[in-house]
Amino acid sequence: MKAFNDLADFSAEEIKALVALADRLDAHPEPDALKGKVLSLLFLSPSLRTLASFQAAMTRLGGGSFVISPDMSIHGLETRPGIVMDGTAAEHIREAVPVIASYGDAIGIRAFAERKNIDSDLAETEFSALTDLIDTPYINMESAMNHPCQSLADWKTLDDLEVPANDGKFVLSWAYHPKALPLAVPATTLHMAAMRGMDVTVLRPEGFELPDALMQKAAAAAETSGGSIRETDDRAEAMQDANVIYAKSWSSTRHYGDRLADQKLREGFLDWCVDESWFGNALEDCRFMHCLPVRRGVVVADEILDGPRSVVIPEARNRMLAQMAVLHQMLGGGS
Ligand code: CP
């Protein structure tokens, strides 16, 4: 495996094999599988789970890792192309990224969306500019429109919960958040659930529709898997017979890159905080998923996070197991 960038680069059978490998590595640890291997981790955006789970994954497989991020005592990093570097930044990513990559056998890169221009973010302009600098195998640790490690872990979580793949009903719901957040998680979650064969409903207020390109990508995956995609702002209709609700906030696509207009629009939807009243039409054992971090009392009520519906902790642990599977395949772990 030369890159783990997008679940769409793999067949459903290949994803199922990765999930099976993650299960196997959990049940039967392989502490020497990646002995002597090194993973470089470049975080241009903040993290808790991804930062910790990749290092834990490499250690559990017998390899090592190192982290570089701008808030460490490194030289200031310049990212703009073609710039005369007469300001505070002492090092350009055109040197820094290949150097960091050269110390490892693979590199993980996180660079959130710039969120200025939707077309540029949909085209993954910034992330491609980074991966174009290296020949090393790489893992997307979250870019503008992708978070494949989260989606692989979420696929495994759905399997662990025995949520039906075909005929399972998955609701991806927008939730209120005071800030305009990236589209990577909703984009990748929508595609993952469609690829798994589920009937997916995107529940969102007007102005927060997901871009056509993302809906079409998911629709193509659903066509192959036997799943379906639809979009609504009707909460009761969306939650009818739902197996899972996956909550996430994201930027207004109507006002993408316009922080003030986005803020004004989202302030009309303060009541989009998932609480028990949302589950009236859902299946009795309908589960709550979220990639974390999550704002309590804003995105979701404590009664849900602390109650039996929530699977956010095992979901987060699955990040480590899913990434162990990816690293095992990418770096040639034993049998
Ligand atoms: N879900 C996720 O990627 O978490 P972090 O941003 O903490 O890595």
Image: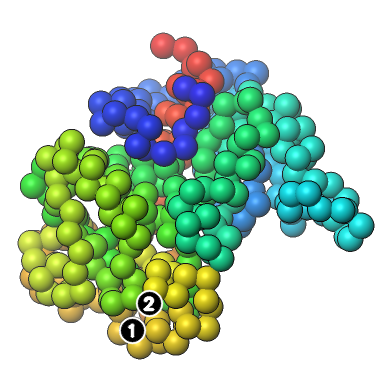
Q: Quadrant of residue 301?
A: bottom left
The reply to whether residue 281 is visible in this rendering is yes
Question: Residue 81's spot in the image, x, y percent?
Answer: 74, 49
- Say if disc 1 is inside 8 Å of ligand 1: no
Disc 1: which residue = 269
Q: Quadrant of residue 249?
A: bottom left
For the residues bearing labels 2 and 1, Cβ distance under 8 angstroms: yes
Q: Is residue 143 above or below residue 292?
A: above
Disc 2: which residue = 176
Question: Residue 90's spot in the image, x, y percent?
Answer: 88, 51
Q: Which scheme is used to colour this image of the protein?
A: rainbow
Instruction: Name the residue rendered at 43%, 60% in the picture.
Output: 183
- Say if disc 2 is inside 8 Å of ligand 1: no
Which callout, 2 or 1, points at the residue further toward the start of the chain?
Answer: 2
Q: Is residue 113 above or below residue 296?
A: above
Callout 2 environment at 10 Å: few (<14), some (14 to 19), or many (20+)? many
Instruction: Name the residue rendered at 41%, 39% in the picture.
Output: 6
Question: Residue 238's spot in the image, x, y percent?
Answer: 14, 67
Q: Is residue 168 above or below residue 65?
A: below
> Does 216 sit left or right of 65 as displayed?
left
